[in-house]
Image: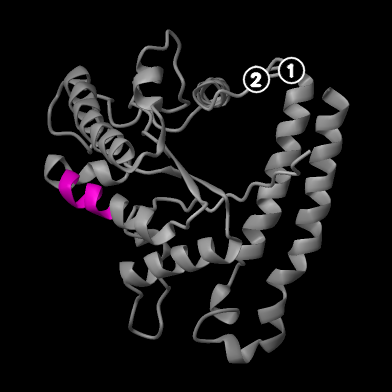
Amino acid sequence: ERRITFRNLGWDGDTVFGHSRTGGRRRSVFGDPEEGFGKMIAHLRQLDPTVIFIAYGWNESFAGLQGIAPFRAGLTRLLQNAGAPTRRFVLLTPVPLEQGFGTELSSPRRTDPSPTTYLAGRNTILKSYRDAIVSVATEGGHHLVDLFEALQQSKRSCTANGIHPSAEGYQDIALIMARSLRLPDPAIALDSPEAGMLRSAIVRKNTLYFHRWRPRNDAFVYGERKQEQVTAQGEPEQFEPFVTKQEKHIREQLEALR
């Protein structure tokens, strides 16, 4: 009834400082994190969401224990800049590392010869970043979804390669989030064909919106060469009707499942 919409603003390898969102090369000059952070905040303000889900900590954890204080400060700054009087935040803790990435005997990412030791060490650091997120959420009165603790207690693997969630992992994460947010249990099994069709429709919508705000060859749209392709500057907006149409399709699928 509320016609809720979602927008995925995630960026590969990003941090609370906006590292991955920095501008590309302008002749011999690259953008800096402050530019990336500013772009993220501007995008959020443009969308004016009522609820923001924030999931950071994994990438920042490679800075080790000495990176916790800067991470905490960066997360706090992000919340302060993205806040609004009626806006709410949901903070997610990172998923734990599982057997796979960086735990092979021949891994160049590890000097310790024991995969078990490496795995335990990485999760100890991730736990410290998880604790920082919990602290920030508690102090700010924000809702917390503790994926780290919940998935560590799970009896089955949640990742495809030690880091990225598998299909089963995403199902587990969805249930953890829904229960934490006190949402009703799913009307259908998450591994059912109907759920798969709904997920495909959502992925399609996310893909359309991705091209709306992250067009290819963005140097011709937003960057130093935009004067060469003036018509390209209006093309990202042309994805909006397709996003709206796909959202209507998603709602129709949801109605059919009731």
Q: Position of residue 32 (x, y in %)?
A: 31, 72
Residue ID at (65%, 20%): 184
Q: Position of residue 234 (x, y in %)?
A: 71, 79
Q: Amino acid at mark 2?
A: Pro
Q: For the view shown, which residue lies furthest in the bottom direction?
A: 227
Q: Amino acid at mark 1?
A: Ala
User: Which quadrant, please, contains the N terminus?
Assistant: top right
Residue ID at (60%, 79%): 221
Q: Position of residue 251 (x, y in %)?
A: 81, 39
State the extent of the magenta-drawn residues as a range.
68-74
Residue designated by label 2: 184
Q: Is residue 19 above or below residue 201?
A: below
Q: Quadrant of residue 122?
A: top left
Membership of 73 in magenta stretch: yes
Residue 214 seen anywhere in this rendered image of the structure? no
Q: Position of residue 124 (x, y in %)?
A: 19, 26
Q: For the view shown, which residue lies furthest in the front direction?
A: 85
Image-based side of 66 in relation to 127, left or right: left
Residue 17 disc label: none
Residue ID at (65%, 61%): 211
Mark 2 element type: loop
Decide whether the magenta segment is chiefly helix, strand or loop: helix
Residue 187 disc label: 1
